[in-house]
């Protein structure tokens, strides 16, 4: 996964980083469409159905997108300040913010697409809505955090898994709180 290694000085020019930043809000809306539909039908908006759906999608997707951005930025600040963060011989963190953000965005995009697809199948098939509304948003962030740690380990040396897992403890809690 070296394509996620983004140089901090060239992050604004990196096309992959820009694509990931653009795809994240699109996948967030895709993930939130089922919950937005539930809210739309629950509140039974009386004005135009299309406009009501747009408003509900915009509010739900916007809040979820802001929470995902906060989770990534706040978790990196906790990760960077940890005394167990994998550093090189000059005590500079081996994982810079654009690399960390790109890795998180990549995993979150995949998780959002998978959640959206499961919501789509659950909407069409008679699957328990408890699974879709309660369990799925709780299970997917756990798998996402494990995938983020596994991808970040690619940027560390062989013996630094303990340091990486220890330094990701507080950021993982923050991500679990914000990524629902």
Image (tube, helix red, strand yellow):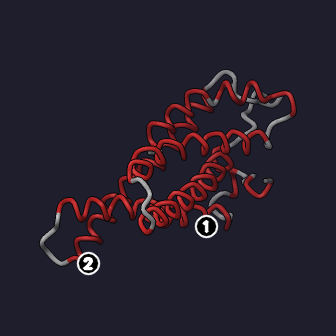
Real-space CA distance between mark 1 and mark 2, rounded to the nearest whole angstrom: 29 Å
Q: Residues within 10 Å of mark 2 (few under 14, many from 20)?
A: few
Residue in the foreground of this view, choosing between 142 and 66 = 142
Q: Position of residue 76 (x, y in %)?
A: 58, 38
Residue at the spot 46% in from the left edge and 47% down from the top edge: 137
Q: Quadrant of residue 151?
A: top right
* N-terminal-most mark, 1 or 2: 1
Mark seen at residue 81? none
User: Which residue is tagged 2?
Assistant: 50
Q: Residues within 10 Å of mark 1 (few under 14, many from 20)?
A: few
Horizontal side of residue 154 vs 142, given as left or right? right
Q: Is residue 168 above or below residue 101?
A: above
Q: Position of residue 119 (x, y in %)?
A: 46, 61
User: Which residue is tagged 1?
Assistant: 19
Q: Is residue 15 above or below residue 65?
A: below
In the current view of this chain or complex, which residue is farthest to the top? Answer: 83
Q: Nearer the viewer, mark 1 or mark 2?
A: 2
Residue at the spot 26% in from the left edge and 59% down from the top edge: 39
Residue in the foreground of this view, choosing between 8 and 30 = 30
Q: Position of residue 86 (x, y in %)?
A: 75, 30
Q: Position of residue 142 (x, y in %)?
A: 57, 40
Element carrying mark 2: helix
In the current view of this chain or complex, which residue is farthest to the right? Answer: 158
In the rendered picture of this protein, how many numbered marks are placed on residues? Answer: 2
Q: Quadrant of residue 41?
A: bottom left
Q: Quadrant of the C terminus?
A: top left
Element carrying mark 1: helix
Horizontal side of residue 165 vs 44, given as left or right? right
Q: Is residue 137 above or below residue 40?
A: above
Residue at the spot 26% in from the left edge and 78% down from the top edge: 50
Horizontal side of residue 18 vs 31, given as left or right? right
């Amino acid at each position: 996964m070296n394509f996620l290694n983004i140089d901090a000085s060239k992050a604004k020019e990196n096309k992959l980083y820009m694509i990931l930043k653009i795809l994240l809000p699109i996948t967030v809306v895709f993930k939130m469409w089922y919950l937005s539909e539930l809210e739309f039908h629950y509140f039974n908006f009386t004005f135009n159905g299309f406009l009501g759906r747009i408003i509900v999608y915009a509010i739900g997707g916007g809040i979820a997108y802001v929470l995902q951005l906060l989770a990534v930025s706040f978790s990196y600040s906790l990760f960077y300040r940890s005394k167990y963060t994998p550093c090189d011989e000059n005590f500079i963190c081996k994982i810079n913010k654009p690399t960390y953000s790109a890795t998180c965005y990549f995993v979150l995009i995949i998780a959002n697409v998978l959640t959206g697809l499961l919501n789509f199948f659950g909407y069409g098939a008679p699957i328990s809505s408890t699974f879709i509304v309660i369990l799925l948003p709780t299970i997917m962030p756990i798998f996402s955090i494990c995938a983020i740690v596994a991808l970040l380990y690619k940027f560390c040396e062989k013996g630094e898994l303990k340091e990486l897992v220890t330094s990701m403890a507080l950021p993982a809690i923050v991500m679990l709180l914000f990524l629902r």
